Image (cartoon, rainbow, N blue to C red):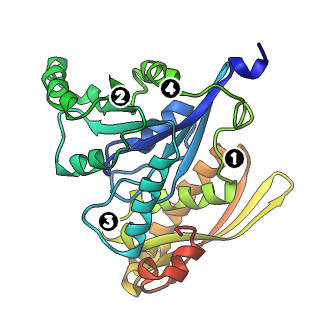
């Protein structure tokens, strides 16, 4: 028996409607923050890969954008294509829903799931139930909707029952050499991760309207010894959005940049010098050229 016959690895898509906790689940599974989170929909816009290697098994998780049913601009169509393409390329699908919440948006995602792949139902936010006995009738309601390979209640936020989830995935990963080095946690580069961390802070520190008309471009990323020197541009749709983002005397932008820099230093394990500018680019979310430039196409 060769060494590779003892090894298993495969791709696992994490799918669901917006705000069910997909990115939080990914971050806790791999033990590192690589996928940004906020309470707002559209936080995840790209396919993010997180890699967990445990002894002879390598789990390659693919965090996808929440499937959009309410918005139809070019950006959202691109995000939906990321979801459907990812489903065709994986070995296992994790269908994530919230405990006690299942509506037509979840149903639409369920109908997208392939029938030639094992689908594990992940019931997230189980820790928020006052009475855990409420979970059983909810499971009995959802279970007949399709043949699930397993049903696993978890708390992504608290990192609870994730070992049970990994055990449910493990039998469906094919035998073969590991796809990534043992110490890799993502296939995304630092430039991409820096842009995402900055975008997360915009989502967290601004109002409801602004994040959906915002994107981030890293215009310069240079290593100077152990220092990372990063120049970033925040793209907004309107002059009014620029003013909202900068805030009184520049305080809002300063807060966003400071918090993003601290997260970058933690993730990159080194000092970061971050300069952030705000630029108006009207209609960027419906421009094929801009979406390609920003990596959405």
Q: CA distance from mark 1 to mark 3?
A: 29 Å
Tell me the residue that label 4 is attached to: 172
Q: CA distance from mark 1 to mark 4?
A: 33 Å
Q: CA distance from mark 4 to mark 3?
A: 42 Å
Q: Residue at x 70, y 56 (%)?
A: 272
For residue 2, above or below residue 99 = above
Which callout, 3 or 2, points at the residue further toward the start of the chain? 2
Which callout, 2 or 4, points at the residue further toward the start of the chain? 2
Q: CA distance from mark 1 to mark 2?
A: 27 Å
Report if the CB atoms under discs 1 and 4 are less than 8 Å apart: no
Report if the CB atoms under discs 1 and 2 are less than 8 Å apart: no
Give the side of residue 246 with respect to residue 54, left or right: left
Report if the CB atoms under discs 2 and 4 are less than 8 Å apart: no
For residue 7, above or below residue 229 = above
Front residue of 180 and 259:
180
For residue 6, above or below residue 149 = above
Q: Residue at x 44, y 86 (%)?
A: 282
**Where in the figure is residue 210, as x and y percent of width and height?**
36, 71
Tell me the residue that label 3 is attached to: 207
Tell me the residue that label 2 is attached to: 155
How packed mark 3 is, by other alpha carbons closer than 10 Å (few <14, some 14-19, many 20 or more), is few
The local secondary structure at tag 3 comes to loop
Q: Quadrant of residue 72?
A: bottom left
How packed mark 1 is, by other alpha carbons closer than 10 Å (few <14, some 14-19, many 20 or more), is some
Which callout, 4 or 3, points at the residue further toward the start of the chain? 4
The local secondary structure at tag 4 comes to helix
Tell me the residue that label 1 is attached to: 268
Task: Assign the N terminus to one quadrant of the image.
Answer: top right
Q: Is residue 36 visible?
A: no
Question: Which residue extends farthest front?
Answer: 116
């Amino acid at each position: 028996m060769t060494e590779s016959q003892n090894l298993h690895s495969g791709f696992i898509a994490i799918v669901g409607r917006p705000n069910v906790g997909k990115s939080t689940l990914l971050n806790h599974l791999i033990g590192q923050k690589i996928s940004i989170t906020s309470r707002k929909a559209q936080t995840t816009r790209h396919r993010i890969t997180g890699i967990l290697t445990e002894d002879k098994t390598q789990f390659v998780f693919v965090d996808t954008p929440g499937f959009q049913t309410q918005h139809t601009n070019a950006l959202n169509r691109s995000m939906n294509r990321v979801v459907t393409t990812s489903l065709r390329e994986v070995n296992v699908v994790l269908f994530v829903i919230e405990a006690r919440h299942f509506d037509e948006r979840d149903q639409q995602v369920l109908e997208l799931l392939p029938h030639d792949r094992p689908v594990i139902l992940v019931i997230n936010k189980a820790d928020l139930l006052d009475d855990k006995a409420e979970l059983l009738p909810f499971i009995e309601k959802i279970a007949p909707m399709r043949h699930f390979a397993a049903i696993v209640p978890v708390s992504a936020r608290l990192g609870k029952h994730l070992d049970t989830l990994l055990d449910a995935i493990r039998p469906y990963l094919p035998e073969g050499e590991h796809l990534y080095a043992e110490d890799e946690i993502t296939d995304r580069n630092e430039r991409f991760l820096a842009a995402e961390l900055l975008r997360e802070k915009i989502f967290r520190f601004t109002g409801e309207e602004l994040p959906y008309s915002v994107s981030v471009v890293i215009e310069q990323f240079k290593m100077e010894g152990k220092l990372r020197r990063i120049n970033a541009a925040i793209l907004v749709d309107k002059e009014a959005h620029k003013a909202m983002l900068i805030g009184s005397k520049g305080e809002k932008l300063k807060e966003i940049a400071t918090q993003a820099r601290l997260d970058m230093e933690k993730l990159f394990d080194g000092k970061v010098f971050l300069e952030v500018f705000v630029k108006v680019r009207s209609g960027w979310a419906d421009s094929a050229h801009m979406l390609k430039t920003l990596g959405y196409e």
